[in-house]
Image (cartoon, helix red, strand yellow):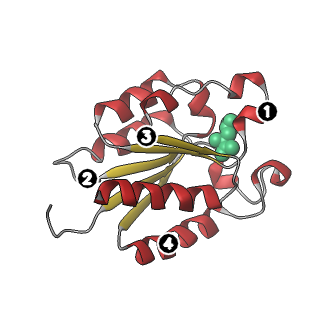
Amino acid sequence: MSDQATRILVIHGPNLNLLGRREPEIYGHQTLANIDSMLEAAAKELGVVIDTFQSNHEGELIDRIQQAMAGESGEADGVVINPGGFTHTSVALRDALAGVSLPVVEVHLSNVFAREAFRKESYVSPIALGVISGLGARGYRFALEALAEHLSS
Ligand code: DQA
């Protein structure tokens, strides 16, 4: 193993920029900025480096994922992603995640299995190391911990 710190890319998909204001009874009161700073603090404790990215655009999410590939400018060792609504629709996003061959942990703030039927299907879950759904913002922290541990083992 190299002595370079483990790098984890944290990706937030569409509409997650509205957290705190968007359906707070479902997604909670924390803003995305709160979540990202909580993750920065958790990353420090875990001794990993994170880069956070949010976009409402499928192509931008795919571009950022491709940059995480070994040898690219935004290279990472693993990905934590809340794909938002693209979870249930995007073959292209799944292909990008599979294509970069990095371990992926999928996160959802809400319990997608307790909601509408269309949310029960995820294009990402079959290629993910694991999925955390329904634990609110804490779910991102658990995902980061699990991925950091996975990458160090
Ligand atoms: C979500 C669940 C998705 O079904 C939804 O489209 C989102 C957020 C969540 O975090 O619970 O945008 O990924």
Instruction: Tell me whether the residue at label 1 lies in contact with that at label 3, contact meaning CB atoms closer than 8 angstroms.
Output: no
**Considering the numbered disc 3 on the image, is that residue within a helix, a strand or a loop?**
loop
Vertical side of 5 occupied by 92: above or below: above
Residue behind mark 1 = 115
Q: CA distance from mark 1 to mark 3?
A: 23 Å
Amino acid type indicated by mark 1? Arg
Residue behind mark 2 = 75
Instruction: Tell me whether the residue at label 1 lies in contact with that at label 4, contact meaning CB atoms closer than 8 angstroms.
Output: no
| Residue sitting at the far front | 153
Mark nearer the viewer, 1 or 3: 3
Residue visible at 47% across and 61% down? 145
* Left or right relative to 20: residue 132: left
**Rendering coords of residue 97 (x, y %):** 38, 35
Q: Quadrant of ligand 1?
A: top right
Amino acid type indicated by mark 3? Leu
Vertical side of 134 occupied by 35: above or below: below
Q: Is residue 12 visible?
A: yes
**Considering the numbered disc 4 on the image, is that residue within a helix, a strand or a loop?**
helix
**Rendering coords of residue 17 (x, y %):** 63, 54
Q: CA distance from mark 3 to mark 4?
A: 20 Å
Residue behind mark 3 = 129
**Rendering coords of residue 153 (x, y %):** 29, 56
**Crowd class of label 1 (few under 14; some 14 to 19; many from 20; radius 10 Å):** few
Residue behind mark 4 = 42
**Considering the numbered disc 2 on the image, is that residue within a helix, a strand or a loop?**
loop
Tally the marks.
Answer: 4
**Crowd class of label 3 (few under 14; some 14 to 19; many from 20; radius 10 Å):** some
Task: Locate residue 45: give its quadrant.
Answer: bottom left
Q: Earlier in the sequence, mark 1 or mark 4?
A: 4
